[in-house]
Image (cartoon, rainbow, N blue to C red):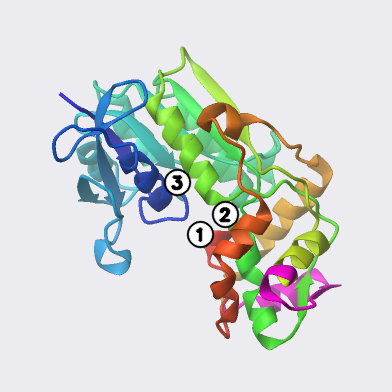
Amino acid sequence: MPETVLVTGATGTVGRRLVAALSGQGGQGGQGSKESHGGRRFTVRALVRDPGRAGPPEGADETVTGDLTDSAAMAEALHGVSTAFVVLAADAGDAFAQAAEKTETLRHLVVVSADAPPDSAHRGPLFARHVLGEARMTATGVPVTVLRPAPFATQALGWAADLAAGDTVHVVHPDLAVPVIDPRDVAEAAAAALRGAPPDGSRVLRLSGPQILDVPERVRVLGEVLGRELSVARVEPDLWVDRVAPFLPEAYARGLLDVERYLHERRLPVVPTVRELTGRAPRSFRTWAEDHAAAFGAPGRGPSSKETS
């Protein structure tokens, strides 16, 4: 019998790509099953909150509807599941964890989180969700693989509104240098972790792109891809929050600035984990920009909370 893999947040930035990555591993088996590199067979079950809004993810064998903060819905989604990919919801994964603790078949959780300071529960909701969520998943007793990716390359979509109006990108921390990662690499790393043998306990895997780039370097690359001469301007935090107000709630925007301040201090390194998990190097920011150039031609396009997470 094929094993069942549950993908939560299956219409999100990573989840949709993860479903595609898992389905792309299909062998010669019958309809509704996939084969991993290790020969195990599995069925991909996608969890979505509103299937009518984004449509079911391509490649899913099964689609179930439910809210990540509803423990009863999570129990139903986890029925017969052996491995699961977990997106931490607003409750820091508590409802999912309650359901996981009662599921006898579950033997591996892969959780997408983020690098955060140990005292983050006292520094804002975005930090707290990751710290508390990781701890809650570990407390289930199910072996956990925590993925902590660097900031997503998709954060550059937050510049689209600026570039629709001119050639200058306005940011609070232009000197923030991070090894941005393509969400496809996060998805493919997660797919490899889900297909692999569960760890003996819990483990943390940090993920990064291939190169550390500050904002002017990323903007330069984007300009070369778009055929435009772009520049960067530093703005005060309050002004930036006002500028992104049409796209992001104020509390979330200020939370992102807290994250940027921490990452400036933390100085995330380039790590080889994507290559170790997938067998190939992570994609460059230039590759991401080339693949998403059309997104910068839409007036008024701004980031969503999913894209900036």
Q: Is residue 24 visible?
A: yes
In terms of sequence position, does the residue under pointer 1 or pointer 3 come before the other? 3
- Element marked by disc 2: loop
Position of residue 248 relative to residue 117, above or below, is below
Q: Nearer the viewer, mark 1 or mark 3?
A: 1
Q: Where residue 220 sits in the image (x, y, percent)?
A: 79, 66
Q: Which mark is residue 309?
A: 2
Residue type at mark 3 is Asp
Find residue 171 and report its image quarter. bottom right
* Other-residue count near label 2 (Cα within 10 Å), few / some / many at <14 / 14–19 / ≥20: some
Residue type at mark 2 is Ser
The residues bearing labels 2 and 3 have C-alpha atoms spaced at a distance of 16 Å
Q: Where residue 20 sits in the image (x, y, percent)?
A: 36, 48
Q: Which mark is residue 306?
A: 1
The residues bearing labels 1 and 3 have C-alpha atoms spaced at a distance of 16 Å
Q: Where residue 195 sits in the image (x, y, percent)?
A: 38, 27
Say if the magenta span includes residue 239: yes
- Element marked by disc 3: loop
Are the two marked residues, 2 and 1, in contact with CB atoms closer than 8 angstroms? yes
For the record, the magenta segment spans 224-246
- Element marked by disc 1: helix
Q: Residue at x 28, y 49 (%)?
A: 59
Specify whether 216 is left or right of 252. right
Specify whether 112 is left or right of 26. right
Q: Which residue is mark 3?
A: 91
Q: Is residue 135 visible?
A: no
